Amino acid sequence: MTRGKLPRWVDYGLIPVMNLAAAFLVAGLVVLLIGENPLEAVRILIYGSLGFGEGIGFTLFYATNFIFTGLAVAVAFHAGLFNIGGEGQAYVGGLGVGLACLALDRFVPWWVTFPVAVAGGAVFGAAWALVPAYLQARRGSHVVITTIMFNFIASSLMVYLLVNVLAKPGSMQPETRNFEAGGQLPLIRDLLPGLDLGQAPLNLAFVLALAACLFVWVLIWRSRLGYEIRTFGANQSAAIYAGISPVRITIVTMLISGGLAGLMAINEVMGSQTRLLLEFTAGYGFVGIAVALMGRAHPVGIILASILFGMLYQGGAELAFEKPAITRDMIVVIQGLVILFAGALEHLFRPWLERLFASGHVPEAQAA
Amino acid sequence: MLDFLSAIFAIIFNLSTLDAAVRLSTPLLLAALAGLFSERSGIFDIGLEGKMLAAAFAAGAAAGVTGSAWLGLAAGVVISIALALVHGFASITARGNQIVSGVAINFFAAGLTVLLGQAWFHQGGRTPQLGPGARFGEVDLPGADVLKDVPVIGDIYNHLVSGHNILVYAAFLAVPFSWWVLYRTRFGLRLRAVGENPAAVDTAGISVAWLRYRAVICTGILCGLAGTYLSIAQSAGFNRDMTAGRGFIALAALIFAKWKPVPAMFACLLFGMLDAVAIRLQGQAIPGVGVVPVQFFQALPYILTVILLAGFIGKAIPPKAGGVAYVKERT
């Protein structure tokens, strides 16, 4: 709202860091409440996520998921749309990836399956965003509400499909058969054995995620469509006056957003689990909201925020292992706090900083 | 076709299904009314789920430790109000994004309940199993005994009306009460006005922020009741993620009811009924249709809400100022 009064380094550097610090301060209080030492917890968390090769591998593996879902939310943000349905779009995207792998894995090598699976994930994810997008564009029903509803519909649909249609014959497990070599992405630890990644499931989807970041940067800041998206997001009436079709921009943006969310499944389904299973999205879609907010909807920021959340996931797992009192649910608590402080309370320190900087430069103005 | 209709009738107009529908719609109703107060005042709240969950945990934990259902209720309501105030602070004072704040509260509650549950009770996130005194038991309404032998009416009164716990009655009494507050009191008039046109309310010399804070406190109280109902009335203790999306179904019901209290009750009864029918039908074939997958019934409230939002069954128009923080002056 009052952006621009502060120097850029404060806006893009200091404020996110202060918000993050506040979130971790409260998280530290929670750790105290459980009766553990917060500083010790931070040490384990950082060592567990960055201290050794395998930890780094896992951190980047989780970060890959967050890059996709974060980009999905960010692209929609630029058009002034709030796509809260990344979870459902990623889930259904998994169906596209899974079907591609199941159809091809026995006949062709992985590099033939890969583009088909990418297309499958993107198309299925985008398709799941289509109805909310259409309803927002044509019927004016709020995309936030419809995407929430579609998350739950996706969940029911996938349970039904996995239990009744896709489960391997003779098994009670609600999951497909394992993909064979033609449906598995190569792991980085096999491609670059010198890196010492241990058992980390970091795979080629990480490279795809970086490519997606480049794609989003080019799309938003270097393409005509991106210009239209940003214009529409900044001022709808001005955009319409300039001849930009609101229906087209809303639908196209949501399709791109859904497609990016759907690509998350490449990392989980094709890269790591090598089968389609229930709830593989595990809340990554929702965390994408926090990632996009913290990363200021810019690909570079999103990569940094994704690595931070990847550290939380991996470090949190180590923490739960070392300190059984601090279960993995601590990660969820920290996520909630980060979303709260970096997202909803992002203006918390702003008025205070504005006064500080204003008084630093022109003290008289403050007195008057 | 006749087979199909009679089968459906037999399932729906069955005392135990109706009874289950009432029980299952109670938490939805409380949460939907909670959302009603907040959203009519212009504060979108997708954190109903988180508040319910936190209240369910607090109620389960307090009742487990003290052995008193009423102290459990108090704990549930207090925690829910606290989270509602966090949402209020983020939305009203800090002028943050209300959707993001709601998501944050859902995350926070989902993590913290299990984390604290495990740290305090060491039962995988569950709270201790509650004895009869620590729960809200069934209340027999006066006259249930006398009417027992009267055909039809006696059965309905005995099974459907009487014999629920006190929170069920509280939920259904909250419907006319909410209606009265919103449509017949000065507070309600102002609350509805602040959700449509806060600038007008401000011009009249009424504090927009204070009105909205009172609205989110109402939301907190009702969400607290909803969560408490789940853990110490319907069940005998808190389980991990025990709200299981009910906060969102309640939100769907609220939209389905076009943000009005009495229609909200019918929407919740409808969604509760869908749930009850799904449980009853599990794996059973309906003549002429075959086995309907249980997931279809689970998705139906959301599908119906989307169809409504699409404008095919009337039009759901949210409060005009919803989701936007009020800024008194131009900046």
Image (cartoon, helix red, strand yellow):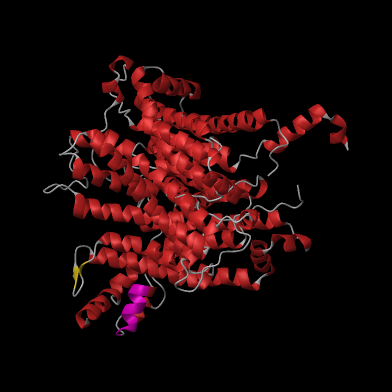
Q: Residue at x 68, y 39 (%)?
A: A3
**Coordinates of residue A94 in the picture (x, y in percent):** 31, 45
Q: Residue sitting at 59 percent across and 29 percent down?
A: A17
Q: Is residue A262 left or right of residue A231?
A: left
Q: Quadrant of residue A119?
A: top left
Residue at the top extreme, as displayed = A194
Residue sitting at the far bottom = B151
In the image shown, does A129 or B164 lie closer to the viewer?
Answer: A129
Membership of B156 in magenta stretch = yes
**Left or right of A227: which side holds B263?**
left
Relative horizontal placement of residue B232, taking residue A78 as reference (left or right):
left
Segment tinted magenta in the rendering: B151-160
Residue at the spot 65% in from the left edge and 54% down from the top edge: A238
Image quadrant containing the N terminus of chain B: bottom left
Q: Is residue A10 above or below residue A104?
A: above
- In this view, the residue in front, B195 or A89, is A89
Residue A337 percent across, percent down from the top left: 52, 38
Q: Residue at x 70, y 57 (%)?
A: B208
Instruction: Please tell me which residue lies in front, B306 or A324.
Output: B306
- Image x and y of residue A196, in percent: 31, 16
